[in-house]
Amino acid sequence: MEGVESFGWVVLGVSLAVVAAILSNRISDRIRIPAPALFLVGAAIASDLFPTLASMRVQTVQNVVTVALIMILFDGGMGIGWRHLRPNAGAVLWIGVAGTAVTAAGIATVAHVALGFGWQVALLLGTALSPTDPAVVFSVLGRREIVGRSGVLLEGEAGANDPVGIALMAVLVGTAGLTGGAAVGHGLVEFLRQMAIGGVVGGVGGWLLLRLMRRMPLPSEALYPIRTVAFAGAVYGLATVCTGSGFLAVFVAGIFVGDANAPYKREVERFHSAVASLAEVVAFVVLGLTVSLRDLPKVDALWPGLIIAVVLTLLVRPLLVGLISLPVKLRAGERIFVLWAGLKGAVPILLGTFAFTAGIPGAQRIYEIVFIVVTFSVVVQGGLAPTVAKWAKVPMRSTELEPWALGMRFREEPTGLRRYRVATGSTADGSTIADLPVGENLWISMINRDGRLVQVAHDTVLQAGDEILALADTDGTSGDPGAIFTAASDR
């Protein structure tokens, strides 16, 4: 029975750690420090207090965090969806790829010129620190949601630059033995190949998954979200064995199914959101366990890390990414916030582990520097994100948790059922239902205002923020009746 008891202690410890991580979100709301920072630093402290926790092999850490990123990127792609991404696809692709490249180059230059690192180590640092993580920003905004183009750009940039950064690191490690033009040429070809294969596999995989979701019924409701999880893993695996970017493939597949209608879609979305939240906790905790805070002064990582973090925050991203983002149309305040909110997350620390598996001299120092930069970014940048958003007047709307739901089940997809939100300045804002210019093309059946049902009558006055459930004319001859709920500037 000793084995059973010891395993019980393991289950108890892991479960209590997850519960503590979840409850730390309440602390995060109060002190305005992103929850991932608490996971990361808390795990690092625990590894110092209990050295046995830090005994995990680097390869195991990479595998665990890779699985977590598959779930996070797929859920991120679903959260954006093609309908929201399509108007901003060019801007997202440009900032995600070019922004990653110039960030990596800028950090590498600083590390080489100002701190005296060799070019190989400097490029490793720059590449590791180039990806961003908007989930950290959103975690400190609380119940405020960014609306408009800036929110889509932040999410899209992170979804794009995570695969780009990982592919760049793989190329950099793979060309370690080459020099000069041979290294550049081989690296460029390898990078383009990974992106192309990943994009194609993700697109085809997302299209196939959507067809399965719509046309292949399953015997149990519980199997629908499990099918999408398994398919996300299959997309990653196929792209990877085809020597492409599995992370890009997963993100693209998520975009394909993001805003499409399918049976049990809400249940699938809720399940993936929960899995992605758990994956984020696991990724930050596992990565935090690999760092020893008491060893930071020994490996001379503290001051180089802080210098790189400050330069990255105040110079590299605002100047370099700011320059390449000039063609993207944004208000001045939104542009400032997007440049400030390029926070670092789990991916840079994962990329830092590549220095160990590649046998790079000074790998421990590289890893510790990356950890310090990420911690600074999450705590300082993330902590100030709400203040910057308020100062920059970034358009937001307040969101409250809605634990109660009303709904009906249908055997077939209901045609014409639409969900709208009344925008400020729209035709519907301040108008009665009887005065809406829709004729017989729209029948409002339910109104949700601030989490409460509002009686539907001819003289009911609609307000900005109202969530509308309606039956709309879908024969295509009368235009989109939902346009009356949209602000004029967004039409």
Image: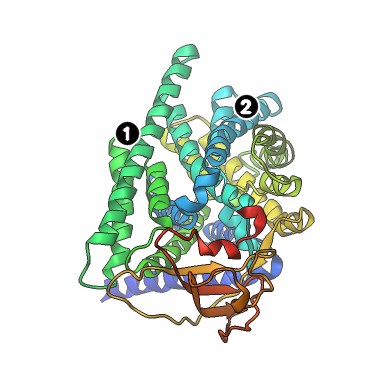
Residue at screen point 47% across, 81% down? 405
Near-viewer residue (207 or 144): 207
Quarter occupied by residue 241 = top left
Callout 2 environment at 10 Å: few (<14), some (14 to 19), or many (20+)?
some
Is residue 271 visible in the rendered image? The answer is yes
Q: Quadrant of the N terminus?
A: bottom left
Residue at screen point 43% across, 51% down? 255
- Helix, strand or loop at label 2? It is loop
Quarter occupied by residue 52 = bottom left
Q: As drawn, which residue projects farthest toward the top?
A: 181
Q: Of the residues under marks 1 and 2, which one precedes in the sequence?
A: 2
Q: Which residue is mark 2?
A: 117
Using the image, tell me which numbered label, if any, was put on residue 22: none
Q: As drawn, which residue projects farthest toward the right?
A: 391
Residue 360 against residue 231 in the figure, above or below: above
Is residue 56 visible in the rendered image? The answer is no
